[in-house]
Image (cartoon, grey):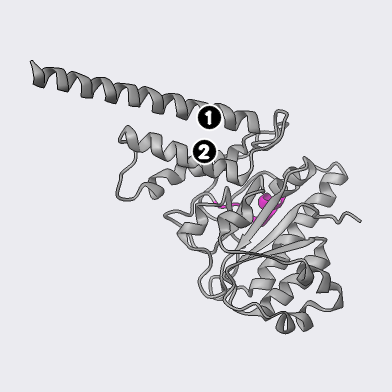
Amino acid sequence: MKHLLHGLDVVLVQTRFPENIGMAARACVNMGCEHISLVAPERWLRDKAAPLATPKGQGILDGISLHESLAEAVADSTLVIGTTARRGGWRQAMLSPEACAAEVADCLRQGGRVSLVFGPEDRGLDNAAITHCHRLVCIPTDPEASSLNLAQAVLLLLYACASAMRAAERGEPAPVHIAAGPERPEETPPGEAPSGTAGHGAPATAADMERLMNALRDMLLRIDYLHGDNPEYFLMPWRRLFGRARLKRHEYDAFMGLCRQVRRALERAERAGKQGRQESDGA
């Protein structure tokens, strides 16, 4: 039987305590999510996780996938959403849980795959992990007690996603894409689909988008648009832009073709300049 959140993968990065994995498995089965991926867990002991998963969650534990890197874990996903409590710097324009859930539901209903990424209990996702996320979501909490248990965060976001799926099945409109804090991305105009929903064809995967970011980084470094000492930081606005766009595969192919053509033009110009200097030196 296909569950409500079929196609959604809960990705737990460097989780410290197997008990939290067990509680996350229980949250998944409660909300109709079928799968958990673990990225380089500090300790993965199934016997420690099992009691907290309850009998219903044992199947989730049995199906857990282990990955060495976040890039590997999300490679087949078409939408990757990271969770964070921190703001500023690399973490801009964060979604509220409701807006996040609307994007997740839209992607799942189109047959896409979604990765919902959670960081380690003591520090959350680092900047390197954030670069693999198309969007970021923040769960608002009281500033006097802002820390959530990992499984609590999983349950809250999966509940929001399940509610959005049920609302979509009833034909109810999705909420506007409001941010969880003072940073507010553009709202969806009335009567228009959320960003990335228009058009036809298969969506680009996270692995596709990482290849595009690598090609774009190379191109922008060649034209001195990016600073060589910290290119990833200055590439983040482009990552956020393409993350919001949720490119289709043919759009990804077009951008890759553009990067290739620019690279070839730059290489021709470099060869011509080198030849001109050699001729000048030999004159």
- From the top left corner, tell me how far across and down residue 64 is, in percent: 73, 67
Q: Quick one: which residue is furthest to the right in this view?
A: 1
Element at badge 2? Answer: helix
Provide the residue span drawn in magenta.
94-101
Tell me what residue is drawn at x 63 percent, y 75 percent. Answer: 149
Q: Is residue 57 visible?
A: no
- Front in this rendered view, residue 249 or 88: 249
Kindly report the distance in space between the C-alpha atoms of the residues bearing marks 1 and 2.
7 Å
Q: Is residue 155 visible?
A: yes
Which numbered dot is residue 212? 2
Quarter of the C terminus within the rendering: top left
Q: Is residue 67 above or below residue 102?
A: below
Residue 114 placement, left or right of 173: left
Q: Amino acid at mark 1?
A: Phe
- From the top left corner, tell me how far across and down residue 158 is, in percent: 74, 61
- From the top left corner, tell me how far across and down residue 165 is, in percent: 81, 50
Element at badge 1? Answer: helix
- Front in this rendered view, residue 277 or 11: 277
Closer to the chain start, of discs 1 and 2, is 2
Q: Amino acid at mark 2?
A: Leu
- Provide the residue designation for mark 1: 255
User: Crowdedness of circle 1 by 10 Å Cα count: few (<14), some, many (20+)?
Assistant: some
Q: Is residue 117 above or below residue 236?
A: below
Please report contact status of discs 1 and 2: CB closer than 8 Å, yes or no. yes
User: Crowdedness of circle 2 by 10 Å Cα count: few (<14), some, many (20+)?
Assistant: many
Q: Quadrant of residue 84?
A: bottom right
- From the top left corner, tell me how far across and down residue 113 is, in percent: 72, 48
